[in-house]
Image (tube, grey):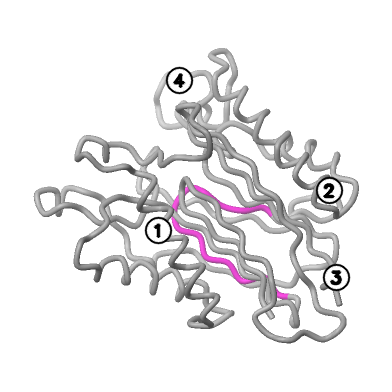
Amino acid sequence: MLSVLSYGRLVARAVIGGLSQTDSGDYSLVTARFGFGKDFRKGVADGVGGWRDYGVDPSQFSGTLMKTCERLVKEGRFVPGNPVGVLTSSYYELLQNKVPLLGSSTACIVVLDRQSHRLHTANLGDSGFLVVRGGEVVHRSDEQQHYFNTPFQLSIAPPEAEGAVLSDSPDAADSSSFDVQLGDIILTATDGLFDNMPEHMILQELKKLKNTNYESIQQTARSIAEQAHVLAYNPNYMSPFAQFACDNGLNVRGGKPDDITVLLSIVAEYPN
């Protein structure tokens, strides 16, 4: 019945497959992923600053958060129209661990109800998604920040840092539901993409996507991530992040080196 995309600030997971028998006319997602860690390691790593000062691998929190979301979905322990609920359940499961997993993460969950053709989303922080139809953005997540370069985030802090580490409730996530159509493109990404590529540049890359086969989607996801990665290390480029910094009274120019993860999906007919 459902296709789900979910990711924390630095780790991407895609779950595509039936949780129930489907009828003809159902939709599904064909999805590919590509990304860079800002320290050039293979794969992706957490970019929420400061956790290494506590001896914590910052990628563990976001990765476990999303794996828990994935398991809850597979077990059917969530309401399709309430992705905030699965995020909440995952977070509180981490909080209840006897040995707490320390760290912070933003999160974005996108659920496709195959039978009703509706997309249900929950976004906490400065990562997010675009839905593109006919070359134009028809839906876009809203970025959530407390102040410049400080996004909403889920956190579990060590006792000595409780009260000093920013932590938001999963209920603070911005949620939405809307219909999708065959051929709609859903781009879900960390802030490393959106901080370095403006919307018009992303749309230009998406025009190169000609069909719904996995290889084409993967190639386009890779092209978008690679371009954002190059721009992130260009000191003379006026990136969206630099423009936002200037709007906040800071004299900043150049890209923003950061983890970049791109999930690219196309709404297609569910295969019989």
* Residue placed most toward the observer, 45 or 112: 45
Q: How far apart are marks 2 and 3 (CA)?
A: 20 Å
Residue labelled with disc 1: 64
Q: How crowded is mark 4: few (under 14 residues within 10 Å), some or many (20 or more)?
A: some
Q: Which is in the foreground here, disc 3 or disc 4?
A: 3
- Left or right: where does residue 120 sit relative to residue 137? left
- Left or right: where does residue 271 sit relative to residue 223? right
Q: Which numbered disc, 4 or 2, marks the residue that appears first in the sequence? A: 2
Whether the residues at callouts 3 and 4 have beta carbons within 8 Å, the answer is no
Q: Distance between the residues labelled 3 and 1?
A: 31 Å
Q: Distance between the residues labelled 1 and 2?
A: 35 Å
Q: Which numbered disc, 1 or 2, marks the residue that appears first in the sequence? A: 1
* Residue placed most toward the observer, 120 or 40: 40
Q: Residue furthest top?
A: 236
Residue labelled with disc 2: 135
Q: Which is in the foreground here, disc 2 or disc 3?
A: 3
User: Can you tell which mark lies on residue 269?
Assistant: 3
Is residue 119 on the magenta stretch?
A: yes
Quarter of the image with the N terminus in it: bottom right
User: Can you tell which mark lies on residue 252?
Assistant: 4
Is residue 41 on the magenta stretch?
A: no
Give SS at disc 4.
loop
Q: Distance between the residues labelled 3 and 4?
A: 46 Å
User: At label 3, which amino acid type do we have?
Assistant: Glu
Give SS at disc 3.
strand
Q: How crowded is mark 1: few (under 14 residues within 10 Å), some or many (20 or more)?
A: some
- Left or right: where does residue 129 sit relative to residue 182? left
Range covered by the magenta-colored residues: 118-130
Residue at image location 85% in from the left, 44% down from the top: 209
Residue 214 image position (x, y, % from top left)? 80, 51
